[in-house]
Image (spheres, rainbow, N blue to C red):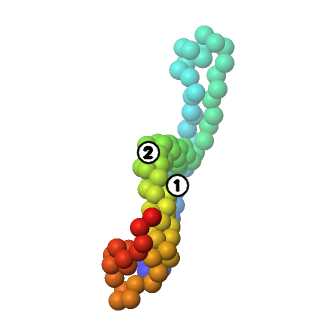
């Protein structure tokens, strides 16, 4: 299984290297449209290789997607925590009832609870 994982990541790395080598030319990124930059008198521009722009864009998209999913699944995680707390409380209650009822003779918990003295 480790060999498959290493092979997969080697192929991904090779693809990234190929994309990087194929997109080495520099591009200029403008933060604002030219008319707006001229109106405000500022022009935040940056020149980067195209592969850097591609990789940063993909990384930012993944980060936004992961954050969106984490926020979307909040209800599910909250319900799972509540269910887990309820299951733990019920297990403690069953353990307490078994301790009060004594050990069942033939391994039948229901009969042991029925034979237990009423409160």
Where in the figure is residue 58, as x and y percent of width and height? 49, 47
Q: Is residue 34 above or below residue 84?
A: above
Q: Is residue 64 above or below residue 45?
A: below
Residue at position x 49%, y 61% in the image: 89
Residue projecting furthest to the bottom: 106
Residue 44 visible in the shown view? yes
Residue at position x 60%, y 17% in the image: 37
The answer to which image quadrant residue 31 occupies is: top right
Residue at position x 41%, y 74% in the image: 116
Q: Earlier in the sequence, mark 1 or mark 2?
A: 1
Q: Which mark is residue 103?
A: none
Near mark 2 (Cα within 10 A), the count class, few <14, some 14-19 or many ≥20, is few
- For label 2, the residue is 75
On the rendered image, what quadrant is the N terminus found in?
bottom left
On the rendered image, what quadrant is the C terminus found in?
bottom left
Residue 41 left/right relative to 19: right
Residue at position x 64%, y 26% in the image: 44
Q: Is residue 93 above or below residue 85?
A: below
Where in the figure is residue 42, as x and y percent of width and height? 66, 18
Q: Is residue 115 above or below residue 11?
A: below
SS at mark 2? helix
Near mark 1 (Cα within 10 A), the count class, few <14, some 14-19 or many ≥20, is some
Q: Nearer the viewer, residue 85 or 18?
A: 85
- For label 1, the residue is 20
Q: Are marks 1 and 2 in contact (CB under 8 Å)?
A: no
Residue projecting furthest to the top: 39
């Amino acid at each position: 299984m480790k060999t498959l994982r290493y092979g997969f990541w080697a192929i991904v790395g090779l693809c990234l290297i190929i994309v990087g080598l194929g997109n080495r030319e520099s591009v200029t990124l403008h933060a604002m449209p030219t008319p707006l930059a001229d109106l405000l008198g500022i022009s935040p521009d940056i020149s980067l290789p195209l592969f850097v722009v591609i990789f940063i864009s993909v990384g930012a998209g993944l980060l936004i997607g992961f954050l969106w999913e984490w926020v979307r699944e909040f209800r599910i995680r909250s319900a799972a925590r509540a269910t887990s707390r309820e299951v733990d409380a019920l297990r403690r209650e069953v353990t307490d009832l078994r301790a009060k009822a004594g050990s069942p003779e033939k391994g039948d918990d229901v009969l042991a609870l029925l034979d237990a003295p009423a409160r």
